[in-house]
Amino acid sequence: MKLMTYDDICQFLYTEASLLDTRRYEEWLELLDDSLSYRMPVRVTRDFDEPDDIVNDMTFFDETKRSLTTRVQRFRTTSAWSENPHSRTRHFVSNIVVEPGTSEDEAKVHSYFLIMRSIRDRADVEQMFGERIDIIRRVDNRLQLVERTIYPDQTVLSMLNLSIFI
Amino acid sequence: MANQAGLDTSMLEGVKDKIRRGLLPQWAFTDSEIFKAEVKNIFAKTWNFLGHESEIENPGDYVTRWIVHDPVLLLRDQNGQIQAYLNSCAHRGTKLCTADFGNKKTFTCPYHGWTFNLSGDLIGIIAGNKVYGEEMDRSQWSLRKIPKVESYQGMIFGSLDEHAEPLETFLGDMKWYFDIMLGRSDAGMEVRGVPQKWIINTNWKISADNFGGDPYHTAMSHRSTVELGISPKDPMYASYGHQIVLDNGHGINMVTALGGAKVPPYQGLPEDMWPMFARNLSAEQLKVFENTMIIVGNCFPNLSFVSPMHGTGGPDEPLTSFVNFRVWRPVSPTKIEVTSWFMVDKEAPEAFKEASYLSYIGSFGPSGTLEQDDAEIWTRVAEASQGEMAQDKDIHYNNVLNYLMGLDRVEPDESWPGPGVAYPTCYLDAISRAFYEHWVDQLLATTDIPANVL
Ligand code: FES
Ligand SMILES: [Fe+2]
């Protein structure tokens, strides 16, 4: 944490959002550490006395850099129909709170996300929102995403598919 | 003449005639009168999948589910018995339990505080004796039971029709194939975590028909995986094997490799498990299972399943099988809520369970590299089926869709060792035709309540 500032982290997350929204996925992959864990567990509604409403055993994403690379390569084929024609997204990232990580060169970063997505000529807006908890590490003077856990707020996703990254 | 759902029966007879000739009117997908009739004549009569026994293992464990628009509270009671109730308070109808799952001994309604136990009995009323006196018979005000609840191979179904045929009769020959997927291991299957849930703007028949009878779509819909080198280049690759038409509108495809080429035995399940399969399956089931790569089908009306082999990385990644069941819950003529369960053999080694789960997440579910494209295309079918030309009932526009594949062209394979009518290719519309014929028969059916209950 000492080796990166709050501004560095904000800059990193906004740059990432912009790469995703402009579908510069290969450049996005370069921000990911080789040991990346990228998960999106399922949110559930629990009883009031059961405060934990995340089920870690089931996910919508449970990815490594390798599997994300495969997903990116798929979008580059001529027949990934979910993104052909591609949908248009805006990743809004806010409420960034930084905690120290387990070492000097790591930070634990909380952020809110709101993704608005427009598909073809459809007037309705697909959206998804929630919180992400990231581990960001400084490696050789640049920042890398080492771990991302995505907590959606919906228990029933209103998006038809997740042919996007979050 | 109109049947009880208010549909013109002669029109439906005409639809049936067309289906038999391999033609389905496009309006059938999204017509709102048809939708109402389906809810009343099909979903309120049939067996609806509610959940798996492993989701409610202990007394007090519960999950909340739906039968179309009926909220269902499914639980295991104090005696270890499975019970399903309408999840609606007997007093003024409030939704009683709002959690997705949990464990409880009693359920208290937030409106006026009536409390019910796991047997559905009304055991607590706030100021009960003061306001209702001793004379109100509390036993009349229990939670309302879903009229019929039965299980097969751990799969719990409920029916809103107290006269529904027994579950095993309804499943019929599908049981033989369920045994292969769900009953091959001594301890059966378990659900991992909770089901994923999401919404797709399509009609429930479009997705049920896709899983049930349409391996033909894979070559084009999933061509991206061919381009990536994950799926075979041969456009016929999903055709090898058998498409099996079962009774009651059910259907299943047992996909293998070209010319009976060697496939990983038992979908690549660990060798340690094979003796167990031999114990639990008949010789015929075992032989079919050994040679099958992909199992995909639909249990009428809207319980689909897929058990393929898939990898998450590039072409050099090992392929791992999984078992996935999903309900396409009809929300409106053009909206479904998908509930999708990942299941794995309880006794599989942990490493296999993990690989199987990753294989599912990578390929199916909303983020799956296969399913992403299915959902998009199914919305395009619904989107293009709502206009005047598609909805016209008088066939001014030749608005019938093509279900002709294999009609009068492909003969059943009499040597198939399993039950059902098995055709020696999966590129065939035989299951779809049978699905829609059963569908229209259910819409045409008028209830025949046994005379003794009238
Ligand atoms: S509606 Fe449930 S107690 Fe009144
Ligand atoms: Fe598909």
Image: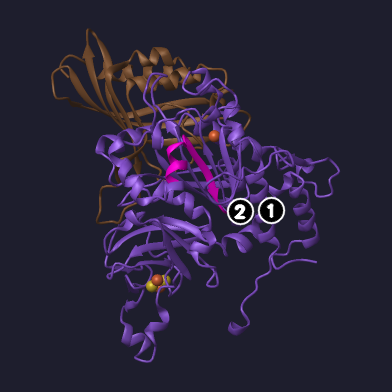
Chain colours: A brown, B purple
* Mark drawn on residue B249: 2
Residue at disc 1, secondary structure: helix
Magenta stretch, residue numbers: B285-300
Asked which secondary structure carries label 2, the reply is helix
> Considering depth in this image, is A81 or B51 the residue closer to the camera?
B51
Extreme top residue here? A140
Q: Give coordinates of residue B55: x percent, y percent.
A: 33, 54
Is residue A76 toward the left or the right of residue A123 in the image? left
Residue B336 in view in this figure: yes
Residue B138 falls left or right of residue B249: left
Residue B106 lies in what quarter of the image? bottom left
Look at the image and tell me whether residue B340 can be seen: no
Q: Mark 2 vs mark 1: same chain?
A: yes
Q: Ligand 2: which quarter? A: top right
The front one of A135 and B309 is B309
Tell me the residue that label 1 is attached to.
Answer: B437
Name the outermost residue toward the right: B396
Q: Name the image quarter holding residue A100.
A: top left
Numbered marks: total: 2
- Residue B368 image offset from top left, x and y in percent: 45, 32
User: In terms of sequence position, does the residue under pointer 2 or pointer 1 come before the other?
Assistant: 2
The reply to whether callout 2 and callout 1 are in contact (CB within 8 Å) is yes
Q: Mark 1 lies on which chain?
A: B
**Vertical order, B180 against A119 (above or below):** below
Does the stretch in magenta take in B385? no
**Which of the image's four quarters has the C terminus of chain A?**
top left
Name the spot of residue B436 as percent of width and height, x first.
67, 50
